[in-house]
Amino acid sequence: MVNDKNRGFTLIEMIVVITILGILAVIAAPRFLNYSSDARASAVEGLKGALVSGASLVHAKSVIQDVDSGTDYVDFNDDGVDDINVRSGYPRVAASCNNFVAELSVWLNMTIDASCEQNADAEWYGVTEQNMFHFMPQGYTATSQNCYVTYTTASKNEGNGWEDTDSAEIVMDTSGC
């Protein structure tokens, strides 16, 4: 009489189980291991939130100092020095990437290493375009890659010069992160 209690798996059964597990791993692993894309998208979302918050603080300070229309400067930390170039009371990009990046540390509620040049050491790469500043995470160099935050100054050009708008515009795209 054969003892069925001690019977193990056959070689064929083991190969079938291993093959099925391999197929499941190939299908499921990319879905669970794509953390770098999620991290970049989260960083972009976090930067957008910080920009919204910081721009709101600058606008509040501009209203208090009565410089919430046209182009002016705000003394953000009340030390008697004009810290931030504003338009309609919100931080102004103007045409200078370097000036905008230099002023970020005054009004942004997070530490950010932004560069106007493609720099392997910087967290963010920034590009100005008219009155917009595009923030892209390290490794991205164009908004066409769909991983960016764009800050737009609170103004528009209707052909007869720049006019104030109600607020700065901050948009993001994480579809390519």
Image (cartoon, rainbow, N blue to C red):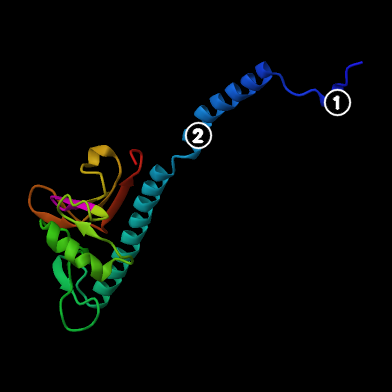
Q: Indicate the quadrant containing the N terminus: top left, top right, bottom left or bottom right.
A: top right
* Residue furthest bottom as drawn: 79
Figure quadrant of residue 15:
top right
- Residue 10 placed where, x, y %? 71, 19
Q: Which residue is mark 1?
A: 5
Query: Along the line of sight, which residue is nearer the eye, 32 or 64?
Result: 32
What is the C-alpha distance between the residues marked 2 and 1?
36 Å
60 relative to 114, above or below: below
Residue 26 lies, with reference to residue 166, above or below; the image says above
Dot 2 corresponds to which residue? Answer: 29
- Quarter occupied by residue 78: bottom left
Residue 115 in percent (x, y) is at 18, 56
Query: Which secondary structure, mark 2?
Result: helix
Q: Are marks 2 and 1 in contact (CB under 8 Å)?
A: no
- Residues in magenta? 125-133
In screen coordinates, is 32 left or right of 148? right
Residue at (8% x, 47% y) in the render: 159
